[in-house]
Image: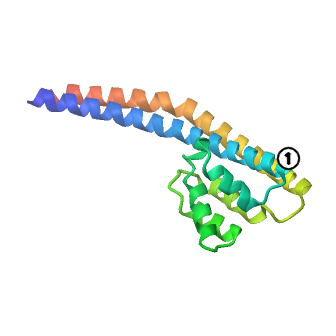
Amino acid sequence: MRLLGAGFLWISLTFLGAAYAHKLKNRIFILERTMQLIKHIKVETEYLNLSAREILFKLAVASEFKELDYIESVCTLIKAGEDFPVAWRNSINNTSLNYKTDERDKLLQLGEKFGTSDVKNQISMLEMYENYFIEFISQAKSKYNKQAKTATGTGVLAGCMLFILLI
C-alpha cells in the first residue's frame, strides 16, 4: 500500500510539471491568436474600411478566434447598447485568458484608440500593437524554452526522490 501511494505521488508530481509546461505552451498559443486578431483587424480596416463594430461582429463568428472569449463578449455588450471602447475595456478586464498586466494594458489601449482616426493612422497604430505582441510572443517562447523541460524534469525527479524516501 505504501508503494502504491509513493507511486501515485511520483505520477502526480510528474503530471504537475507537465501541466506547467502545457500552461506555458497555451500562453504562446493565446498570444499568437491575439496577434492574428490584430492582423485581421488591420486587413479589414485597410482594405474594406469597416468600422470597429463591423469588424468585431465579423470576427466573432470566425472559428479561428473562438479561444479569444472577449470578442464575443464585446459583441454582446455592443448589442446591449455599450459604446465600443467601454465594451472592449469591460471584455478585456473580464477575460479568462492568462494575459500578463502589460499585455492586458496594450489590449486596453488598443480598444481606446481603435476607430478614432483615419484609416492611415489606424493602420500605423495596429502595426505598432502587432509589434508589441510579436515581442510578447518572443518573451513567452523564451520562457517556454527555458522552463518547460525543467518543470517536467523537476516533477519527475522530485517524484522519484519522494518515491525512494517513502518506500
Quarter of the picture containing the C terminus is top left
Please determine whether, in this image, residue 87 is positioned above or below residue 152.
below
The answer to which quarter of the image holds residue 133 is top right
Quadrant showing the N terminus: top left
Horizontal arrangement in the rendering, residue 89 relative to residue 21 (left or right): right
Image location of residue 42, percent across then percent down:
79, 48
- Using residue 52 as the reference point, say whether residue 24 is left or right of it: left
Which residue is label 1 attached to?
Answer: 47
Question: In the picture shown, does residue 31 fall above or below 75?
Answer: above
Estimate the x, y position of residue 59 in percent, counting from the top left.
66, 50
In depth, the one of 89 and 146 nearer the eye is 89
Is 10 or 123 nearer to us in this picture? Answer: 123
Look at the image and tell me whether residue 114 can be seen: yes
In which quarter of the view is residue 35 placed?
A: top right
Q: Residue at x 39, y 30 (%)?
A: 154
Q: Residue furthest left?
A: 1
Residue depicted at 60% across the width and 41% down the height: 64
**For residue 74, which quarter of the picture?**
bottom right
Determine if residue 110 is in view: no
Say which element carries label 1: helix
Q: Position of residue 10 (x, y in %)?
A: 26, 30
Q: Position of residue 109 (x, y in %)?
A: 72, 61
Position of residue 35 relative to residue 85, above or below, is above
Q: Residues within 10 Å of mark 1 (few under 14, many from 20)?
A: few
Amino acid, disc 1: Tyr
